[in-house]
Amino acid sequence: MCIRDRVSHIEHLGIAVKSLDEAIPYWENVLGLTCYKIEEVADQKVRTAFFMLGQTKIELLEATSEDSTIAKFVENKGIGIHHMALAVENIEEQLADASEKGLRLIDATPRKGADDMTIAFLHPKSTQGILTELCEKK
Ligand code: ZN
């Protein structure tokens, strides 16, 4: 992947929280952002809350089940930054290219994510330790 040509900006930072109710007041009252959407993503077993910060979003992720990857993340590492999402165009092409360049794909084909995005995750073992999500507005 060539960042300069293919990724326009950080679409969002995904942040693992224990509880949206506990986390949202920090983002709203301390940082002065407004939560514009709360959305449950059933197949990922999370409830998400979104804030705009410039052209980048903050995505808070709360587990809705103990076997959610977010529940496991919080248990092992605590709350905090979980993934970085890059805004791309032609996500299928970017995913094929990432695979060609030897990156490990968590999602072999793009799938539906929160906030009307088509997404695919790349494995952190092949992305310098950062769980990376490719994101395209569809
Ligand atoms: Zn995300």
Image (cartoon, grey):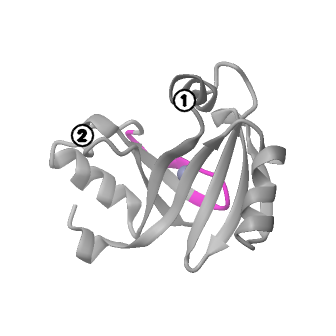
Which residue shows up at 70% across the image and 69% down it?
A: 31
Residue position marked by numbered label 1 in the rendering:
73
Amino acid found under the numbered disc labelled 1: Phe
Q: Is residue 53 above or below residue 135?
A: below
Q: Residue furthest front?
A: 30
Q: In the rendered picture of this protein, how many numbered marks are placed on residues? A: 2
Foreground: 15 or 25? 25
Of helix, strand and loop, which mostly describes the magenta segment? loop
Query: Which quadrant: the C terminus?
Result: bottom right
Range covered by the magenta-colored residues: 108-117
- Give the label on residue 126, or none: 2
Q: CA distance from mark 2 to mark 1?
A: 18 Å
Q: Is residue 1 left or right of residue 123?
A: left
Q: Residue 109, position in %: x, y?
A: 42, 44
Q: Residue 28, position in %: x, y?
A: 78, 66
Which residue shows up at 15% across the image and 49% down it?
A: 101
Q: Is residue 14 above or below residue 79?
A: below
Q: Report which quarter residue 49 is drawn in.
A: bottom right
SS class, disc 2: helix
Foreground: 29 or 52? 29
Q: Is residue 117 left or right of residue 109?
A: right
Q: Residue furthest top?
A: 67
Q: Report which quarter residue 29 is drawn in.
A: bottom right
